[in-house]
Amino acid sequence: MLTLLIGKMETPLGELLVVADEQGCLRSVEWQEFEGRMQRLLALHYGKPGFVLRETVNPHGLATALEAYFSGELGVIESLPVATGGTDFQRRVWAALRAIPCGQTLSYGALAQQLGVPGASRAVGTANGANPISIVVPCHRVIGANGTLTGYAGGVSRKQWLLQHEGATGYLVPQHKQQLSLL
């Protein structure tokens, strides 16, 4: 059985859950109010009862690294170790997400093209939505084909904040979502 260490941390956007394995690899980063989603993804990837969560503070220093990211040291997330379950295709998508430079965005279609599966933007979007390691596997950097911010498991307002924090430009905020209610 896989033992996972779970810690909580405060961010400018709310409480974040940080889950790591005993080797220090991130297995999940999720907003506290979506803990149920996190539990479902962990069960899907590792089986039920294929893992046990053990509460700890700052698992392997990963919460400290994420605090540095939120404090402006944006590059710190690029070197954080991750390990995921998921299908081969999902892991390919998640690896491609990590290759999107900080401060840049990419459309689902362009990401599908990079992966050599043009026309599979919906499959890429589905894999993106199943990403268990928010922020570090930067699914927030993927936008709609027309440049509009689209769904993000933590909410479009958080996605907008993260992109602004990283200095990204050139995306459009849907009219009904222009308020950054989390600031």
Image: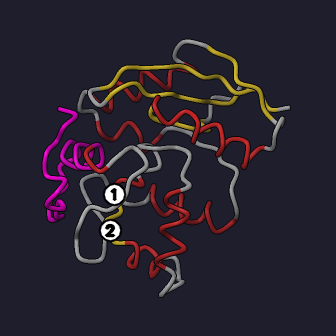
Q: Identify which residue, 77 or 141, lies in the foreground.
A: 141
At 44% from the left and 34% from the top, the residue drawn is 31
Task: Residue 40 in the image: state x and y as whole percent.
Answer: 66, 43
Decide: is 182 above or below 9.
below
Residue that mark 1 sits on: 141
Task: Residue 166 in the image: state x and y as whole percent.
Answer: 23, 46
CA gap between label 2 and label 1 equals 6 Å
Task: Residue 50 in the image: state x and y as whole percent.
Answer: 83, 37
Residue that mark 2 sits on: 106
Element assignment for label 1: helix
Decide: is 13 above or below 133.
above
At 80% from the left and 32% from the top, the residue drawn is 2
Q: Is residue 119 magenta?
A: no
Which quadrant of the view contains residue 114? bottom left
Decide: is 29 above or below 92.
above
Checking the image for residue 30, the label placed there is none
Question: Where, quadrant-wise, is the C terminus in this rendering?
Answer: top left
Task: Residue 135 in the image: state x and y as whole percent.
Answer: 41, 43
Q: In this view, does 152 lie to the left or right of 148?
A: right
In the image, which residues are magenta? 158-183
